[in-house]
Image (cartoon, helix red, strand yellow):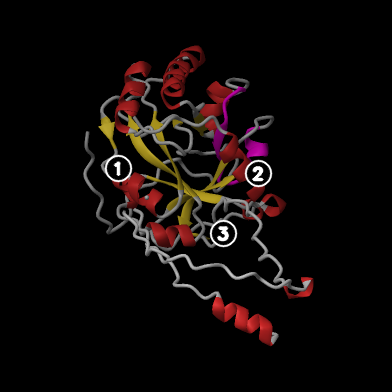
């Protein structure tokens, strides 16, 4: 710095003002295969819960007579500080596939491992889950068993619903449809027990023939479609999202071929690619294993994958019709 400029700076030094602010946010395919039923059995030795229905201050600055400032050469003026460019908000983290399988299947060139976004579905049978470990092992989303019929609530639902969200998984809830119960009653029961939360995945209706159920009724295809429509319409009105249909190959063959073309499907196919088991049907999610193994879970767990790459996953999440804030 030149001497004249140094003296000028010393003369212009004034008491500095300072401020402080504080502010206070199932299957069984006809041909020999690895296909298994859609239900996960009780894990050996694992405990399973029983079923259950400020001000700021400023220092004064004393004005002093101003002295004329000498002209300053242009090359002595400091350039303005560059401002950082705005960055696009982070979309989140996608964890890579790190699962194992107790009964692995070779899907060949159609391996689900080639897809980016994997997830799981759970119920009371998984008991206590370490969601942070499960997420880091490859679970980016989860569908959680909430209800079935018109009076059964999975006893682990609310705990799983809360803990999965806290661990950063995208979460949704599913209802196991009971063919011996009125569809509107089942919809009301689901709505009563599943929170309406902004950002949740679309609700799921699980339709399959359950050979272990006390309900042995198998309605006609027309009746099946009618009951499903009643249930799904009521959920769509309440949650503002079109429900996803989960199903299995035998139930699909009996009832769903060519039906509900405007609904997203979640297809179970644990021995072959869905394109072979459900020819001509577009799908959103593929349940490719019922015998998955992962850190954070005792025993086996269902493994699923989203039909698209990571960019398509974020685009789908951002493009869904979102629900309003929770009531």
Report, in whole angstroms, how far the alpha carbon at label 3 lies from the one at label 2.
17 Å
Q: Are marks 2 and 1 in contact (CB under 8 Å)?
A: no
Residue 266 among those drawn in magenta: yes
Report, in whole angstroms, how far the alpha carbon at label 3 lies from the one at label 1.
26 Å
Secondary structure beneath label 3: loop
Residue at 57 percent of width and 42 percent of height: 286
Secondary structure beneath label 2: helix
Question: Which label belongs to residue 97?
Answer: 3
Question: Which label belongs to residue 312?
Answer: 2
Which image quarter: residue 73? bottom right
Number of callouts: 3
Residue at 60 percent of width and 38 percent of height: 316
Which residue is denoted by mark 1 in the rendering? 158
Question: Whole-percent x and y of residue 323?
Answer: 46, 30
Q: Is residue 171 left or right of residue 48?
A: right
Q: Would residue 114 be seen by someone viewing this image from the given angle?
A: yes
Report, in whole angstroms, how far the alpha carbon at label 2 lies from the one at label 1.
29 Å
Mark positioned earlier in the residue sequence (3 or 2): 3
Residue 31 among those drawn in magenta: no
Q: Are marks 3 and 1 in contact (CB under 8 Å)?
A: no
Residue at 60 percent of width and 70 percent of height: 67
Question: Which label belongs to residue 57?
Answer: none
Which residues are drawn in magenta?
A: 261-278
- Looking at the image, which is closer to me, 240 or 30? 240
- Looking at the image, which is closer to me, 168 or 264? 168
Quadrant in which the C terminus appears = top left
Asked if 45 appears above or below 242 in the picture, the reply is below
Q: Residues within 10 Å of mark 3 (few under 14, many from 20)?
A: many
């Amino acid at each position: 710095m030149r001497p004249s400029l140094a003296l000028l700076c010393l003369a212009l030094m004034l008491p500095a003002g300072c401020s402080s602010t504080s502010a206070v946010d199932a299957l069984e395919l006809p041909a020999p295969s690895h296909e298994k039923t859609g239900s996960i059995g009780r894990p050996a030795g694992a405990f399973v819960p029983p079923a259950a229905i400020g001000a700021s201050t400023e220092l004064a600055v004393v004005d002093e007579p101003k002295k004329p400032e000498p002209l300053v050469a242009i090359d002595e003026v400091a350039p303005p500080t560059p401002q950082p460019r705005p960055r696009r908000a982070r979309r989140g983290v996608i964890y890579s596939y790190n699962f194992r399988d107790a009964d692995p299947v070779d899907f060949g060139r159609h391996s689900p491992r080639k897809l980016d976004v994997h997830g799981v579905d759970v119920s009371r049978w998984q008991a206590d889950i370490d969601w942070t470990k499960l997420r880091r092992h490859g679970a980016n989303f989860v569908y959680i068993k909430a209800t079935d019929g018109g009076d059964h609530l999975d006893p682990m639902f609310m705990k799983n619903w809360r803990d999965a969200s806290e661990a950063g998984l995208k979460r949704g809830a599913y209802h196991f449809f009971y063919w011996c119960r009125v569809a509107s009653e089942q919809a009301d029961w689901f709505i009563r027990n599943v929170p309406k939360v902004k950002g949740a995945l679309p609700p799921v209706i699980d339709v399959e023939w359950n050979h272990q159920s006390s309900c042995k009724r198998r309605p006609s295809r027309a009746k099946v479609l009618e009951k499903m429509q009643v249930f799904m319409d009521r959920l769509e009105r309440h949650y503002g999202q079109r429900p996803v249909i989960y199903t299995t190959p035998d139930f699909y063959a009996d009832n769903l071929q060519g039906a509900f073309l405007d609904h997203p499907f979640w297809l179970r196919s644990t021995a072959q690619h869905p394109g072979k088991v459900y020819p001509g049907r577009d799908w959103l999610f593929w349940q490719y294993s019922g015998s998955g193994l992962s850190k954070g879970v005792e025993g086996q767990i269902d493994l699923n994958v989203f039909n698209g790459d990571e960019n398509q996953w974020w685009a789908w999440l951002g493009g869904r019709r979102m629900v309003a804030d929770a009531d």
